Image (cartoon, helix red, strand yellow):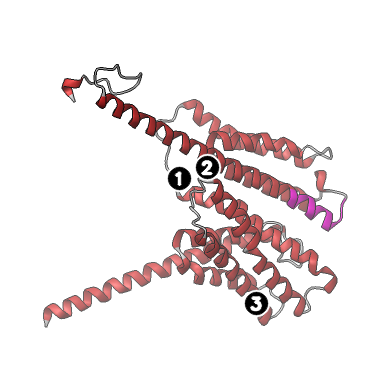
């Protein structure tokens, strides 16, 4: 009986620890969602809760890709904490929360369906993140949220499509910009055996990107194209680890310029500014994401070919040991194999 009681107590304690760890993870997801939302609301453009970049969608999708579908209660809790104080009515808040929760969950399910890899090391992964994770999945949150504002009387009928487009593109940009950065941070490790020039390049890249973006977005002359060489540089040299942070820098600075009405985004209506801004942000995010995936896939293919060639050379040597070994191969003599 004592042994049975002891085993029961061990199982109970194990269950409590497991549930406690799950609760902590969900609380962390909710806290990250809320913090991202507060940052996003600093640049609201429509009714105090529709922004051109909504970080919580990117955070929510990254959490789902990392923790699995069990992360959805944390997303819902964070959405409630964000929308309850600013929502027009309780039914509208519930609808917005439902849309904000369903959108990343559906994006996650679509990505899992097509075999998406969080490393984003294939072109198909980048395309899936763009078209399924961002553009398709975020239709849910934009449509449900904007309809809730309209039905509650908080949004005029004539402003529906403007609000919907800002909501949709803001949620999509959250996935395109924030999710890759978080996926990179998840796999980040301290560099080892890296030369000083490589470290200097890694520091100069984001600083140069920020400096050029500030110039391009603060002058009346249209110089936005200047940021693309830096994004290409980041993708070629550092792949997603360099391209994702640089894309985030460009997006944040461009949004700040638009909100202040300066640079090439000034002297236009809200709709014109949003179209220009989101077209620019979408182009930078797509350039960084797709090019980094192409380079990563190319490098992996090259390494695979090199391994196959080395294995083939070894087979040839074993079949004809009197033949000289190719340069860089195994130079052991036949009698020492």
Magenta stretch encompasses residue 277: yes
Residue 41 falls left or right of residue 158: left
Q: Nearer the viewer, residue 120 or 13?
A: 120
Q: Which of 153 and 48 is in front in this view?
A: 153
Q: Which residue lies furthest to the front in this view?
A: 319
The quadrant in which the N terminus is found is bottom left
- Residue 241 — which label? 2
- Residue 95 — which label? 3
Closer to the chain start, of discs 2 and 3, is 3
Q: Quadrant of residue 337?
A: top left
Q: What stretch is highlighted in magenta?
A: 268-279
- Residue 188 — which label? 1
Q: What is the x, y in percent for residue 214? A: 72, 40
Q: What is the x, y in percent for residue 61? A: 54, 60
Q: Residue at x 53, y 59 (%)?
A: 111
Residue 68 falls left or right of residue 277: left
Q: What is the x, y in percent for residue 21? A: 38, 67
Question: Mark 1 near mark 2, Cβ–Cβ under 8 Å?
Answer: yes
Residue 220 falls left or right of residue 201: right
Residue 25, visible in the rendered structure: yes
């Amino acid at each position: 009986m004592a042994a049975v009681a002891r085993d029961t107590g061990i199982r109970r304690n194990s269950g409590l620890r497991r549930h406690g760890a799950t609760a902590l993870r969900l609380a962390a997801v909710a806290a990250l969602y809320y913090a991202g939302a507060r940052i996003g609301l600093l640049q609201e453009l429509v009714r105090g809760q529709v922004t051109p970049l909504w970080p919580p969608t990117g955070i929510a999708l990254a959490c789902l890709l990392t923790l699995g579908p069990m992360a959805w209660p944390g997303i819902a809790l964070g959405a409630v904490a964000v929308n309850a104080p600013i929502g027009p009515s309780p039914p509208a808040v519930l609808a917005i929360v439902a849309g904000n929760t369903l959108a990343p969950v559906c994006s996650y399910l679509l990505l899992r369906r097509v075999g998406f890899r969080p490393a984003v090391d294939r072109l198909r992964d980048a395309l899936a993140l763009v078209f399924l994770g961002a553009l398709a999945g975020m239709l849910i949150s934009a449509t449900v949220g904007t309809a809730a504002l309209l039905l509650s009387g908080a949004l005029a009928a004539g402003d529906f499509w403007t609000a919907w487009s800002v909501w949709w593109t803001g949620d999509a940009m959250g996935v395109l910009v924030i999710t890759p950065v978080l996926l990179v941070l998840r796999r980040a490790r301290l560099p080892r055996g890296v030369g000083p020039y490589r470290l200097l390049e890694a520091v100069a890249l984001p600083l140069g990107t920020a400096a050029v973006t500030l110039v391009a977005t603060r002058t009346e002359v249209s110089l936005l194209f200047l940021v693309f060489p830096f994004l290409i540089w980041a993708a070629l040299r550092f792949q997603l680890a360099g391209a994702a942070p640089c894309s985030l820098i460009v997006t944040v600075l461009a949004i700040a310029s638009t909100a202040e009405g300066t640079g090439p985004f000034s002297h236009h209506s809200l709709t014109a500014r949003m179209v220009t801004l989101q077209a620019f942000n979408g182009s930078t995010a797509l350039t960084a994401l797709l090019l980094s995936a192409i380079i990563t896939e190319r490098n992996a293919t090259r390494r695979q070919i090199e391994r196959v060639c080395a294995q083939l050379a070894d087979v040839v040597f074993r079949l004809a040991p009197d033949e000289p070994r190719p340069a860089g191969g195994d130079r052991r003599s036949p009698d020492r194999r």
